[in-house]
């Protein structure tokens, strides 16, 4: 059984952080195509919180199925001391760390951050509302993914949600993508679409965006962790 170690980076509220920990931390997964003949979705996973129950359900370990893994959220790291996500992670039993970015040169901060993440021997770094522009020191050393509240490549940047809401388009959405040297521009892993209601207030639209993110992001993390090239 493989253990997949992930760290989650955030700066504030941490609702995605919480959704990720609840859905993934200390849980066992097997790709649907490994146990359901003709499964048509590579992104569907069977989940269990209990190893013996998991083995019983899958009955595959003995037959050498390689596609089972356990996810461990080994670190929740914030660049802000007052990020509410810190409380969420602590409540859910995940180790937290604060690495303050204020007043530091971008490269210095990224170097320190990379050092901390490398020590963790991660399979994947997951950005969830981590409000930092990352330098190549980070992007070229850490395999990371991010969630963005618009249908990329539309509405990149810190105001993606509001720009998407204010646009004349009749739909918006969210995107999960690999982190690359260029902001919000890495390869897209998953997207979800939302119809816009012209009378809907921003707060209500934002709530729907978050709800969609909380469903899409854990699934996208799993699909990356389970992908053969990974
Ligand atoms: C999310 O909307 C995400 O798409 C963006 O930052 C926001 C973080 O929200 N990158 P939360 O801290 O997870 O509640």
Image (cartoon, rainbow, N blue to C red):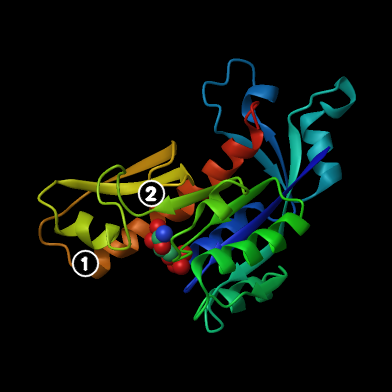
Q: Residue at x 49, y 47 (%)?
A: 179
> Which of the labelled discs sits on residue 192, or is there none?
none
> Which of the labelled discs sits on residue 202, or is there none?
1
**Quadrant holding ligand 1?**
bottom left
The mark closer to the camera, 2 or 1, is 2
Q: Residue at x 67, y 73 (%)?
A: 97
Cα–Cα gap, marks 2 and 1: 22 Å
Give the residue at mark 2.
184
Q: Quadrant of the C terminus?
A: top right
Q: Is residue 193 left or right of residue 128?
A: left
Q: Quadrant of the N terminus?
A: top right
Residue 81, located in which quarter of the rendered image? bottom right
Q: Is residue 18 visible?
A: no
Query: Earlier along the polypeptide chain: callout 2 or callout 1?
Result: 2
User: Which secondary structure lies at badge 1?
Assistant: helix
Where residue 152 appears, as percent x and y from the top left, is 31, 43
Number of numbered discs visible in the structure rendering: 2
Compared to residue 161, the image places residue 32 above or below, namely above
Compared to residue 32, the image places residue 49 above or below, namely below
Classify mark 1 as within 8 Å of ligand 1 or not, answering yes or no. no
Where residue 37 appears, as percent x and y from the top left, is 64, 16
């Amino acid at each position: 059984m493989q253990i997949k170690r992930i760290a989650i980076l955030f700066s504030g509220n941490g609702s995605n952080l919480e959704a990720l920990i609840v859905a993934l931390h200390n849980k066992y997964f097997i790709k649907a195509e490994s146990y359901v003949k003709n499964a048509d979705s590579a992104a569907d996973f069977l989940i269990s919180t209990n190893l013996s129950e998991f083995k019983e359900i899958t009955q595959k370990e003995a037959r050498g199925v390689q596609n089972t893994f356990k996810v461990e959220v080994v670190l929740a790291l914030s660049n802000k001391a007052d990020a509410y996500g810190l409380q969420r992670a602590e409540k859910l039993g995940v180790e937290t760390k604060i690495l303050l970015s204020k007043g530091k040169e971008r490269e210095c901060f990224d170097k320190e951050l990379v050092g901390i993440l490398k020590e963790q021997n991660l399979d994947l770094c997951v950005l969830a509302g981590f409000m930092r522009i990352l330098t190549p020191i980070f992007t070229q050393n850490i395999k990371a993914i991010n969630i963005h509240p618009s249908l990329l490549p539309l509405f990149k940047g810190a105001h993606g949600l509001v720009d998407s809401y204010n646009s004349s388009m009749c739909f918006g959405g969210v995107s999960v993508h690999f982190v690359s040297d260029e902001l919000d521009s890495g390869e897209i892993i998953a997207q979800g679409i939302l119809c816009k209601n012209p009378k809907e207030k921003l707060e209500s639209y934002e709530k729907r965006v978050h709800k969609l993110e909380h469903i899409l992001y854990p699934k996208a993390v799993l699909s990356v962790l389970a992908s053969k090239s990974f």
